[in-house]
Image (cartoon, coloured by chain):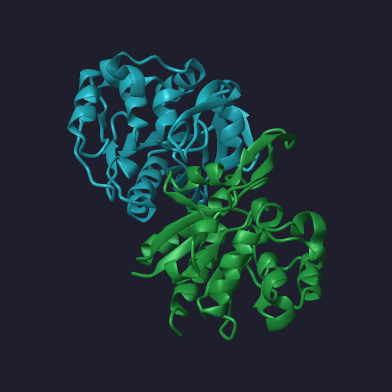
Chain colours: A green, B cyan
Amino acid sequence: MPKVALILSGCGVQDGSEIHEAVLCLTALQKAGAEIFYCAPDMDFTSVNHLTGKSAEKRNALVESARIARGNIRDIAKVSAKDVDAAILPGGFGAAKNLCTFAVDGPDCKLNEPTAKLLRDLKSAGKPIGAACIAPALLAKLFGADNHPELTIGNDAGTAAALEKLGAKHKTATAAQAVVDRKNRIVTTPAYMCAKDAAEAWPGIEAMVKETLGLIGK
Amino acid sequence: MPKVALILSGCGVQDGSEIHEAVLCLTALQKAGAEIFYCAPDMDFTSVNHLTGKSAEKRNALVESARIARGNIRDIAKVSAKDVDAAILPGGFGAAKNLCTFAVDGPDCKLNEPTAKLLRDLKSAGKPIGAACIAPALLAKLFGADNHPELTIGNDAGTAAALEKLGAKHKTATAAQAVVDRKNRIVTTPAYMCAKDAAEAWPGIEAMVKETLGLIGK
């Protein structure tokens, strides 16, 4: 049974993990027989009221992510690359505001260090990483300059250009597709970067999860 | 394209809609070609920190449900049975603490009146209602005494006895099954009342959604 870190960043598209993507990722992982290690950074962020779109009170990414994980979650700073065989990152603004600051700073974004450390250690150990929606931006920032990974965020020209500025090679894809970079062991799918709903995101997310699991030990 | 109210009660298993169930319900509805009307009661509740399990600050069910609905949600008090062809209720403690108080008061539970009104009006109009997990308790309270609907909450004897006390007929079922009461146009599935994970809940939830949609106009 492969062990997979599901890296969350809160609970809600505007300030955390995109909920549909997170649930479709975990469902695909469970269908494939994987054991999930839910994790998120223990960090505060400014929440967004999803009814009004306005900024609201401070919340904590680990505490809010525990809603998606049904309480079974750990601080990502305490997860070692040795504990798992792979990692999966759903999207949502949390991936681009909490795990890194790409949504605010673009190619000059900063990284959440415990998250970056786990991903770097997984990459060094040859363990695969899958990402959906805007989460590939984090991988472009981490690995673009040295490894030039082939990634997708769908078909948005501006975002694709920002990933290429970081050294990644962007490949246009639909929500039904997953882009596999076998050399770098990185798999990506556009999800809500171009899907109109969860049903349209599902085939690409399931493909991304299966391809990621298929790269374990390869 | 059938129009379906997806009735939410917050965002998180301990104090709102069970997130996996809600997302699997909406994905099944979208796969089946339904148009979803997300709605929730505009009411405050005591939130639960899902990391520690402790009671925390007040939150609002409509505002938190908007996280699952990606902002596209309305106050259930403003939804008329004329607007939709059917309704679906995911589970989670929100269904048994916010939509009604079954988790606290058992068969003596009180109902959230705007939610109860919509469900009564749908029933009177012959429009089908589907429910997962503990949400069937709300239907037992609403319709048990007069209509004796056949329902399932899985295989938990204590909960089943409480539903029967309300006048419902309980039928044992697995997470893969949906129980269809054609006379009352009510469809139920156990989901996390007995599923070990989202992948195990998915077949029953998809069956519940399909059977509910199949009862429209019948």
Residue B44 at x, y percent in the picture: 56, 21
Report whether A6 appears left or right of B109.
right
- Which residue is at the front of the view, A121 or B201? A121
Q: Is residue B146 shown to the viewer in this render? A: no
Residue A43 at x, y percent in the picture: 63, 47
Q: How many marks overall? A: 0
Residue shown at 49%/74% (left/top)? A212
Image quarter hosting the N terminus of chain A: bottom left
Q: Is residue B93 shown to the viewer in this render? A: yes
Quarter-of-image position of residue B138: top left
Residue A76 at x, y percent in the picture: 53, 57
Report whether B13 appears left or right of B145.
right
Residue A33 at x, y percent in the picture: 35, 66
Residue shown at 81%/64% (left/top)? A108
Report whether A140 appears left or right of B80.
right
Q: Is residue B94 above or below residue B2?
A: above
Residue shown at 26%/27% (left/top)? B149
- Residue at the front extreme? A78
Q: Is residue A126 above or below residue A17?
A: below
Residue shown at 51%/34% (left/top)? B5
Quarter-of-image position of residue B37: top right
Quarter-of-image position of residue A104: bottom right
Q: Is residue B17 above or below residue B23?
A: above
